[in-house]
Image (cartoon, rainbow, N blue to C red):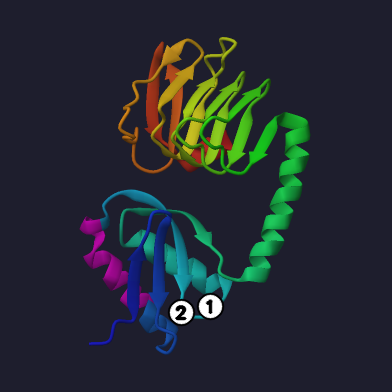
Amino acid sequence: MKNTVVIKSNKAGMTVILDPEIPFEQLVSDVADKFGSSAKFWGSVQMTLTLSGREMTPEEEFRIVNTITGNSQIEVLCLLDQDLNRTRRCEKALNEKLMELSAATGQFYRGCLRSGETIDSETSIVVIGDVEQGARIVSKGNIVVLGDLYGSVHAGISGNEDAVVAAFEMAPSGLKIADFEAKCSDRGKRLARGPVMVSVQDGQIRIESMKKSFFRR
């Protein structure tokens, strides 16, 4: 029997390869069957999604995403675009917006922070990249890592207990918010699966999966 829907997983998320020849309605049905039958395997998880193998309109892509989430416990954080020109336009627009925001609300650091490197910030900071083990970030405000966090971080260093630390993957060697310290493993164990936010609530460190409400906040 021909496989019209093929799923490939990786560290960053999931790629779904779709048959380019069958009618779209049949494809939607096959996607529903595929993810419905494998729902227990994937469990409740957040991930990025890439659709490949077939040219589709934005409306068709939206329907495929809704079919996946409607037949599983997968939460699609974002749909990665394989259109190189469109991706470049989006990156340019994003960079321009980041520069605008950095002037008004805080700092942005683009690139991976390597072992031995340190960032000290008087405001909240967003790192667009990974923070490797041995690297360190200190901020009076929030620390957001749009990548993997393996180094040590100290948010709200001036005593700001409302500060938060967030990252797509979090296995820090050390983490503090104001005077509160999280228990971290020296073996690189993740604090939780997928995007994570760490905050101080009722005088204790709280670790929770990051939802879309975080970005609205």
Residue 39 lies within the magenta run: yes
Q: What's the amino acid at mark 2?
A: Gly
Q: Quadrant of the C terminus?
A: top right
Assess disc 1: are there few (<14), some (14-19) or many (≥20) residues with their C-alpha within 10 Å of its C-alpha. some
Residue 56's tag is 1
**From what the image shows, is residue 106 above or below residue 109?**
above
Where residue 22 sits in the image (x, y, percent)?
40, 88
* Side (left or right) of 215 relative to 201: right
Q: Nearer the viewer, residue 55 or 183?
A: 183
Residue 82: image quadrant is bottom right
The residue under the point 60% across, 11% down is 158
Quarter of the image containing the N terminus? bottom left
Viewer-closest of 38 and 185: 185
Q: Position of residue 71 (x, y in %)?
A: 31, 62
At a point 48% along the width and 80% down the height, the residue shown is: 54
Q: How crowded is mark 2: few (under 14 residues within 10 Å), some or many (20 or more)?
A: few
Q: Compared to 196, does 43 lie above or below?
A: below
The part of the chain drawn in magenta is: 28-41
Residue underneath mark 2: 53
Residue 126 bears which disc, if any?
none
- Residue at the spot 61% in from the left edge and 35% down from the top edge: 126
**Under tag 2, what secondary structure?**
loop
Q: Where is residue 83 in the image (x, y as percent from the top left)?
A: 60, 71
Taking the magenta stretch, the answer to whether it contains residue 53 is no
Q: Which image quadrant is residue 112 in?
A: top right
